[in-house]
């Protein structure tokens, strides 16, 4: 069976960090995802999706994201049954986050964008931002090389491995 979801959207409200009775952190939040298609003359519609993040991912979301932040999530769909206050049976459909990533530029609210992501237990830098020193204005590109910089390899013999 395959249950994989990848979504990108904006947070509808600030995520709230909660702790279960057993001491596990969790965050529930909702994101708005624009639909790909809009009929001519109509505004583009959006879907509002509920997301759940557990443990240190919940801490990460609450620390670095706020209302309006652009976020990318991959995870899986989960349904659960519950009874509302009136005793009616209800079904909740939510996305359980596996990986949470920044999707937008850095804004004045303090969240960063495009440079980090969160998977499993610890944040990681992407290759582009990790390789770029912060005190250097421009890093020379690899395309600045010359064809004379490369040596011809004789491949007529057997490979050494």
Image (cartoon, helix red, strand yellow):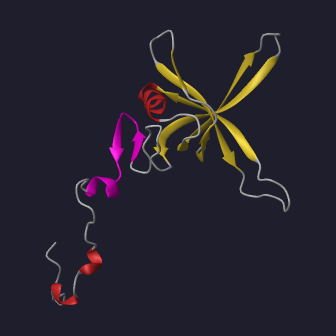
Foreground residue among 11 and 122: 11
Q: How many marks?
A: 0
Q: Which residues are magenta?
A: 116-132
Q: Quadrant of residue 159?
A: bottom left
The residue shown at (35%, 39%) is 123
- In-image side of 6 versus 145 (left or right): right
Apparent side of residue 39 relative to residue 91 in the rendered image (left or right): right
Q: Quadrant of the N terminus?
A: top right
Residue 43, visible in the rendered structure: yes
Q: Position of residue 66 (x, y in %)?
A: 53, 34
- Residue 144: x and y in percent read 25, 80
Residue 84 sits in quarter:
top right
Q: Who is closer to the viewer here, 48 or 95?
A: 48
Whole-percent x, y for residue 128 in the image: 33, 58
* Location of residue 52 (image quadrant): top right
Does 89 appear above or below 61? Answer: above
Q: Is residue 3 visible?
A: no
Instruction: Write the residue at 40% across / 36% down.
Output: 120
Q: Residue 81: where, in percent of width, then height? A: 72, 21
Q: Is residue 96 left or right of residue 126?
A: right
**Quarter occupied by the C terminus:** bottom left
At horizontal 80% and vertical 18% (from top left) the residue drawn is 89
Residue at image coords 25%, 71%? 140
Between 115 and 55, the residue placed more toward the observer is 115
In reply to whether residue 108 is colored magenta, the answer given is no
Extreme residue in the front direction: 108
């Amino acid at each position: 069976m395959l249950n994989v979801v990848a979504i990108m959207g904006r947070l509808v409200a600030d995520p709230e960090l909660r702790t279960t009775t057993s001491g596990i952190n969790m965050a529930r939040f909702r994101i708005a995802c624009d639909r790909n298609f809009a009929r001519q003359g109509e505004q583009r519609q959006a879907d509002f999706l509920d997301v759940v993040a557990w443990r240190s991912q919940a801490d990460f979301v609450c620390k670095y994201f706020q209302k309006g932040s652009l976020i990318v999530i991959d995870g899986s769909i989960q349904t659960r049954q519950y009874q509302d206050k009136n005793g009616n049976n209800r079904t909740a459909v939510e996305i359980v986050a596996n990986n949470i990533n920044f999707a937008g530029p850095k804004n004045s609210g303090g969240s960063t964008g495009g440079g980090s992501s969160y998977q499993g237990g610890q944040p990681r830098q992407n290759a582009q931002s990790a390789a770029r020193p912060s005190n250097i204005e421009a890093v020379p590109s690899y395309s600045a090389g010359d064809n004379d910089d490369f040596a011809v390899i004789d491949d007529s013999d057997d490979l050494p491995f």
